[in-house]
Image (tube, helix red, strand yellow):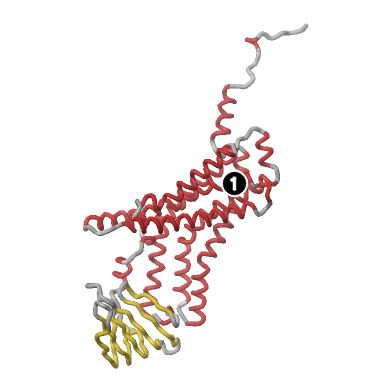
């Protein structure tokens, strides 16, 4: 006997709960197996990219530390610790690069091995494919901002403490022959030859400016000099003091057998008062800006640095939006296409950031646009490329 089901007696094609789960499955990131697969693929290139660029960015300091330890008998513990303290700043710059690199490499491999084509054939849109990359980029952006705002200023401050302490206690290992070095904003030294055995500086030239009034600095030339071991002083021997008038004409030459140069300040005061913007958190930058504005002084450069504190971490998300559709489009071009796109993106972004800062300071553009203009440019380009790939 045939049983015929009426429309009311038929089972629904899809249960309501299944429809809800299907929507969650495709809208909420990392609930699908595809997202978790992408996440696993991203971990290795991201970590390798970050570690590689940390090594590249700190390699110069590490080489200098080893050279100072071996050739100039500088304290190994302090110099290596200073290099370690400089690593968070390198990491803050390497994290966005690592994110761009892993996005390009993973999408390039998926396209080259036809996995993206299989997903597209299964009605998975490019926007849905990119969702896990964008979500990871958002979390990386937040983490990079925290690193840049909370950890980097303190680590840079400690690195400079070590550097200043070594310079004030025994500057010989930190000074190289035939180079200028800055002691303060008003005091510059040049040493023709450093004798590391006797801790003497041969052929010393000092530029000393009066901070109270603008004028040409006086130039002091000495046969040799030494750092006073118990005081913040340099003792110059057998030299001549050259003085100039406001027009730059030489007005006096005063010979001396011994001349004492007082270093500007004690170490703690010097470090606390002269911290540069990258050694300050956003809260400290905001306080300095308000203090300068209350006293009628210009705070333009500090305002640019303040906005860069936000725009540089945001570059992670912006460049992911830019690099992902390009990696999908050129995924069939070869295994090096993703790497090339990542390097090109970093090069173009840094160039745009440098141009924006130079033009902004030259023509006094609003600090917000100086710091964020490259993000808007690459963000719009990324959204347009994403629309083209839909």
| Residue 200 is at least partly visible in this image | no
Vertical position of residue 64 compared to residue 370: above or below:
below
Residue at (27, 58) in percent of width and height: 298
Of residues 234 and 40, which is closer to you in this image? Answer: 234
Residue 24 percent across, percent down from the top left: 55, 31
Corner quadrant of residue 2: top right
Q: How many marks?
A: 1
Of residues 220 and 13, which is closer to you in this image? Answer: 220
Of residues 85 and 259, which is closer to you in this image? Answer: 259
Residue 357 percent across, percent down from the top left: 41, 57
In this figure, which residue is indicated by the disc labeled 1?
Answer: 326
| Residue 1 is at least partly visible in this image | yes
Residue at (46, 53) in percent of width and height: 144
Give the farthest residue toward the right.
1
Residue 216 percent across, percent down from the top left: 28, 77
Horizontal side of residue 18 vs 235, given as left or right:
right
- Quarter of the image with the C terminus is top right
- For label 1, count other residues whose C-alpha is less than 10 Å away and answer few (under 14), some (14-19) or many (20+): many
Horizontal side of residue 228 vs 61, given as left or right:
left
Residue 231 percent across, percent down from the top left: 30, 82
Residue at (36, 75) in percent of width and height: 182
């Amino acid at each position: 006997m045939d049983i015929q089901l009426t429309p009311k007696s038929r089972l629904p094609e899809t249960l309501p709960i299944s429809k809800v789960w299907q929507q969650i499955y495709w809208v909420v990131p990392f609930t699908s197996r595809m997202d978790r697969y992408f996440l696993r693929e991203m971990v290795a290139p991201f970590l390798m990219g970050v570690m590689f660029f940390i090594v590249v960015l700190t390699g110069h300091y590490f080489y200098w530390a080893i050279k100072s330890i071996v050739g100039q008998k500088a304290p190994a513990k302090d110099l290596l610790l200073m290099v370690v303290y400089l690593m968070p700043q390198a990491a803050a710059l390497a994290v966005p690069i690592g994110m761009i690199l892993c996005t390009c490499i993973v999408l390039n491999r998926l396209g080259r091995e036809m996995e993206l084509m299989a997903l597209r054939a299964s009605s998975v849109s490019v926007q849905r494919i990119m969702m896990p990359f964008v979500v990871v980029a958002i979390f990386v952006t937040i983490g990079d901002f925290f690193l840049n705002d909370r950890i980097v200023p303190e680590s840079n401050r400690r690195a400079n403490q070590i550097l200043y302490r070594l310079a004030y206690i025994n500057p010989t290992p930190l000074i190289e022959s035939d180079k200028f070095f800055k002691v303060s904003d008003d005091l510059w030294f040049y040493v023709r030859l450093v004798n590391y055995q006797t801790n003497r500086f041969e052929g010393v030239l000092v530029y000393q400016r009066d901070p109270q009034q603008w004028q040409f600095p006086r130039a002091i030339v000495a046969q040799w000099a030494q750092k006073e071991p118990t005081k913040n002083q340099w003792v110059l021997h057998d030299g001549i003091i050259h003085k100039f008038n406001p027009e730059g004409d030489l007005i006096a030459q005063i010979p001396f057998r011994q001349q004492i140069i007082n270093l500007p300040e004690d170490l703690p005061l010097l470090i606390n008062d002269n911290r540069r913007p990258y050694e300050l958190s956003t809260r400290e930058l905001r306080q300095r800006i308000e203090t300068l504005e209350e006293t009628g002084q210009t705070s333009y450069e500090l305002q640019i640095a303040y906005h860069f504190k936000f725009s540089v971490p945001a570059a992670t998300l912006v460049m992911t939006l830019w690099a992902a559709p390009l990696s999908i489009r050129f995924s069939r071009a070869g295994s090096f296409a993703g790497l090339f796109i990542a390097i090109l993106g970093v090069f173009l972004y840094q160039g745009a950031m440098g141009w924006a800062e130079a033009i902004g300071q030259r023509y006094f553009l609003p600090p917000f646009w100086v710091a964020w203009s490259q993000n808007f440019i690459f963000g719009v380009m990324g959204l347009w490329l994403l629309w083209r790939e839909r």
